[in-house]
Image: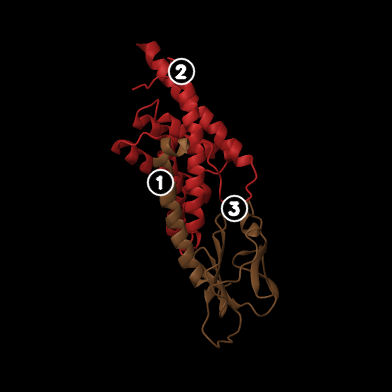
């Protein structure tokens, strides 16, 4: 029994570590367009829906945001608030769709990508820059959110399909 | 075609968002104007500067700090210098149309072009500091 629980934890922390590596790696890359990034860390989050129950996926997102921002030294900064709000919005939408029966990772990821950016925009407007005109940024953010969501969904799909070939990587409870 | 048949649902979701983005973009484009632009600078949600874009100037605002330099030239405005971590605000470049914005999230600076009153030739005003 202990060995079984250890296996579950190992799988979870493997996903978490990979998610953190991708998060930190992406923060080092130059961004040609301000604020817009692909969100490579979400490859692990989206593929996690196939391997972990929803409460573990939620923990994965939360731990990744907190520990990732600790690594980058941005805990307590406005960037951390935006990262947290975007991740929660994105996770909320994906969990909602998953509960409704959506299993297609690309669909989950597209909605997650758009709502990640929308969540950040709403929190920025509410708490940081109250005179911000949200509508000015909406078209571009919706476009990029959907495209990055599609890319992440494709990558997550590929990863999940490869992992499922190994018996150890089956959905744990 | 085969990809479309297998992933038609994905394509539908994408098109849904692209239509929304397209409609929003269309309405925003209709509102784009350069009539009577007034630049307003907000710092921590308080307006600290309001002025027209006719007169070229390079300036700082004491309340924000001497390290943030704003520039107005040829009817446009930008953040010329800033020592925030990523300097995204500087890369946003020049703005001059109504509703155009430059944002610095770490310093909570917002530069907005708003619609001024017609025939208003009021002086440049530093509102605080």
Disc 3, SS: loop
Which residue position is annotated with label 2?
A165
Q: Are marks 2 and 3 on the same chain?
A: yes
Q: Which chain is brown?
A: B
Which residue position is annotated with label 1?
B12
x%, y% of residue B17? 43, 51
Q: Chain of mark 1?
A: B
In the figure, what tint was chain A given? red
Disc 2, SS: loop
Q: Residue at (64%, 41%) from the top-left corner?
A: A29
Q: Residue at (47%, 59%) from the top-left corner?
A: B22
**From the viewer's perspective, is residue A30 above or below residue A22?**
below
x%, y% of residue B19? 43, 55
Q: Which mark is residue A34?
A: 3
Alpha carbons under labels 1 and 2: distance apart: 30 Å
Q: Residues at badges 2 and 3 in contact (C-beta under 8 Å)?
A: no
Q: Which mark is residue B95?
A: none
Q: Residue at (46%, 25%) from the top-left corner?
A: A161
x%, y% of residue A112? 42, 43
Camera-side mark, 3 or 1: 1
């Amino acid at each position: 029994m202990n060995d079984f629980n250890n296996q579950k934890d190992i799988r979870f922390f493997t996903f978490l570590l990979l998610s953190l590596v991708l998060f930190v790696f992406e923060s080092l890359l130059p961004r040609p367009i301000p604020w817009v990034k692909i969100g490579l860390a979400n490859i692990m989050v989206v593929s996690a829906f196939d391997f972990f129950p929803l409460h573990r996926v939620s923990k994965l997102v939360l731990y990744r945001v907190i520990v990732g921002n600790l690594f980058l030294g941005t805990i307590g900064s406005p960037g951390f608030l935006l990262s947290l709000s975007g991740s929660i919005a994105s996770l909320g939408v994906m969990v909602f769709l998953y509960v409704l029966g959506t299993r297609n990772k690309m669909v989950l990821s597209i909605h997650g990508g758009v709502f990640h950016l929308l969540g950040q925009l709403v929190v920025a407007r509410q708490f940081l820059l109250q005179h911000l005109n949200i509508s000015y940024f909406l078209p571009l953010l919706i476009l990029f959110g959907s495209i990055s969501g599609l890319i992440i969904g494709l990558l997550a799909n590929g990863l999940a399909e490869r992992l499922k070939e190994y018996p150890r990587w089956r959905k744990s409870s | 075609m085969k990809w479309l048949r297998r992933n038609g649902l994905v394509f539908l979701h994408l098109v849904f968002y692209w239509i929304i983005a397209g409609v929003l973009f269309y309405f925003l484009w209709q509102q784009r104007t350069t009539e009577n632009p007034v630049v307003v600078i907000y710092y921590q949600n308080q307006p600290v500067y309001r002025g027209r874009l006719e007169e070229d100037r390079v300036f700082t605002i004491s309340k924000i700090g001497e390290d943030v330099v704003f520039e107005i030239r040829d009817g446009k405005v930008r953040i010329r210098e800033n020592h925030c971590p990523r300097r995204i605000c500087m890369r946003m470049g020049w703005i001059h149309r109504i509703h155009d914005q430059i944002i610095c999230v770490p310093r909570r600076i917002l530069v907005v072009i708003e619609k001024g009153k017609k025939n208003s030739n009021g002086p440049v005003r530093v509102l605080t500091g």
